[in-house]
């Protein structure tokens, strides 16, 4: 396990009607051996709903590491805590592997167990990303009561094989966990997440 702990993050967790500051979160990069069952390989027969040959392969040279500025990771954690007890969801646009903008999206399900992005917001966001010459780099969402690992539903609904999937777990609200993956063809591939300083920061 590679674990990087970031201190003094300006995030908040709802406690009744009060807001309580969260002082840290943990970026976790875990590599699970296949026998443990952590790496899913789902076929169309058991519910993945993916036809062979329709999605790009998951093994890519650029998957050595996903780099995100600290402010982007802070914002994902903050979003997850503010939307708790429901799952949050959002998109990070990028260019050449560099994040350019984070978009909070509305979870129309308003559920602690699943998410679905608002269709109008998604269309508007995707048009803006295309018009700006960016790419849809990251799709993120939160798990309110489970670990930061894609569920079977997450895998079944993953329709952007070229994107990274970042999950924020609120199992420990005082120290949320953040992890990144590729999801393609029903297969989950962990990708190390590196939090880097924001441009211009010291």
Image: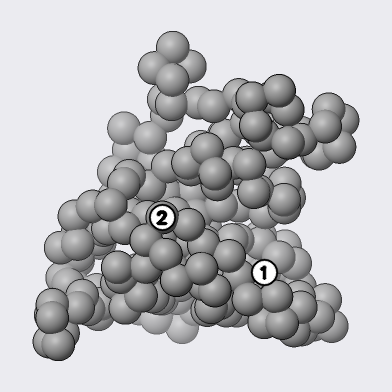
Q: Position of residue 104 (x, y in %)?
A: 52, 79
Count neighbours of disc 2 (C-alpha within 10 A) and say few if under 14, some if 14 to 19, many if 20 or more: some
What number of labels is visible?
2
Residue 94 tag number = 1
Q: Is residue 196 above or below residue 185?
A: below
**Mark 2 secondary-structure assignment:** loop
Residue 82 can be seen in this image: yes
Residue 196, position as x, y percentages in the image: 43, 64
Q: Are marks 1 and 2 in contact (CB under 8 Å)?
A: no
Please tell me which residue lies in front, 170 or 153.
153
Compared to residue 5, the image places residue 64 above or below, namely above
Q: Eyeballing the image, is 131 above or below 8?
A: below
Q: Quadrant of residue 102?
A: bottom right
Which comes sooner in the sequence, label 1 or label 2? Answer: 1
Closer-to-camera residue (180/50): 50
Residue 11 in percent (x, y) is at 25, 77
Write the residue at 66% across / 62% down: 137
How far apart are the alpha carbons under marks 1 and 2? 28 Å
Left or right, 42 with respect to 17, comes to right
Residue drawn where x is 67% and y is 82% of the image: 121
From the image, tell me which residue sits under label 2. 113
Q: Is residue 202 left or right of residue 48?
A: left
The answer, for residue 65, to whether it is visible in the render is no
Tell me the quadrant of the picture where the C terminus can be found: bottom left
Q: Where, quadrant-wise, is the N terminus in this rendering?
A: top left
Would you say 94 lies left or right of 81 here? Answer: right
Q: For the view shown, which residue lies furthest in the bottom direction?
A: 17
- Mark 1 vs mark 2, foreground winner is 2
Which of the 4 quarters of the picture holds residue 76?
Answer: bottom left
- Residue at the image position 82 percent from the left and 32 percent from the top: 51
Q: Residues within 10 Å of mark 1 (few under 14, many from 20)?
A: many
Residue 66: give x, y in percent of width and height: 54, 52
């Amino acid at each position: 396990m590679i674990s990087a702990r970031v201190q003094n993050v300006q995030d908040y967790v709802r406690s009744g009607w009060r807001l309580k500051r969260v002082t840290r979160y943990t970026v976790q990069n875990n590599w699970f051996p296949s026998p443990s069952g952590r790496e899913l390989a789902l076929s169309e027969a058991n519910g993945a709903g993916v036809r062979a040959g329709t999605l790009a392969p998951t093994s890519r040279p650029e998957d050595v590491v996903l780099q995100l500025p600290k402010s982007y990771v802070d914002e994902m954690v903050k979003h997850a805590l503010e939307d708790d007890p429901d799952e949050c969801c959002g998109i990070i646009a990028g260019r050449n592997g560099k994040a350019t903008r984070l978009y909070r999206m509305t979870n129309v399900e308003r559920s602690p167990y699943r998410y679905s992005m608002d269709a109008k917001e998604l269309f508007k966001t995707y048009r803006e990303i295309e018009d700006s010459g960016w790419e849809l780099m990251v799709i993120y969402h939160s798990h309110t009561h489970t670990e930061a690992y894609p569920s079977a539903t997450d895998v079944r609904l993953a329709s952007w094989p070229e994107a990274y999937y970042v999950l924020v777990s609120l199992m420990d609200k005082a120290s949320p966990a953040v992890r990144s993956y590729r999801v393609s063809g029903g297969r989950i591939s962990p990708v190390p997440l590196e939090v880097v300083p924001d441009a211009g920061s010291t």
